[in-house]
Every structure is written in C-alpha cells, then in structure tokens.
Amino acid sequence: MEKKRPTSFDDLPLIMTVEDLAPILGVGKSTVYELVRCGRIKSLRIGTQIRILKQELIQFLESSDSQVS
C-alpha cells in the first residue's frame, strides 16, 4: 500500500523517518542521510534509526542554507 503524500505542513507527522522526508524534499534517501550527517538537518537517533522532528524540518527549510546541491 502506498503512503499518502502530505499536502501541507499540518498534514506532516510530528516525527518522520528518512524515508518519509525524502519525497517531501524531492530528493533521494542518500541526500537526506547526507543532510543529517553534516548537521544541516538536526535529527534524533534511536538505536540505529534516524528520526527527524517536524520542527527541525521547518527550521531547515526556513534557513538560508536549505538549498540542496
């Protein structure tokens, strides 16, 4: 079953995975992992899993360095 893509920030879950975030940003999972690794998107680690808070995504998008290259 395919996940429904959010149409607004209000539809986003409070906590997202890399797999959730990639289509929202329009990039691949490896790009999201790199953004997390270099600290451009702040994240939480739960064991080996990475979680991104909705607020951290919003801060990333509002920041001047949110341009993904």
Image (cartoon, rainbow, N blue to C red):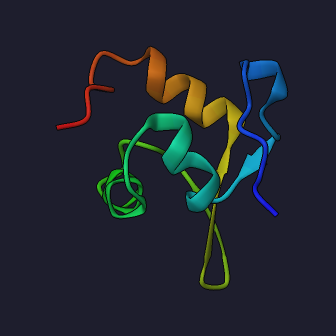
The residue shown at (83%, 27%) is 11
Determine whether, in the image, residue 44 is placed left or right of residue 32.
right
Residue 33, position as x, y percentages in the image: 39, 62
18 or 59, which lies in front?
A: 18
Rendering coords of residue 38 (x, y %): 29, 55
How many numbered markers are drawn? 0
| Foreground of the two, 33 or 22 | 22
- Taking the view exactly as shown, the residue that stands out farthest to the left is 69
Q: Is residue 38 above or below residue 4?
A: below
Q: Position of residue 59 (x, y in %)?
A: 53, 24
Q: Residue furthest front?
A: 1
Question: Residue drawn at (41%, 54%), measured in percent from left and top?
Answer: 32
Identify the image quadrant of the C terminus: top left
**Quarter of the figure with residue 66:** top left
- Quarter occupied by residue 58: top right
Residue 63 occupies quadrant: top left
Name the side, left or right, on which 4 lies relative to 43: right
Q: Is residue 67 above or below residue 50?
A: above
Instruction: Please give left or right for residue 62 compared with residue 9 in the image.
Output: left
Q: Position of residue 50 (x, y in %)?
A: 60, 67
Residue that appears at 82% across and 64% down: 1
Residue under the point 30% across and 15% down: 64
Q: Is residue 3 above or below residue 7?
A: below
In the foreground, 69 or 28: 28
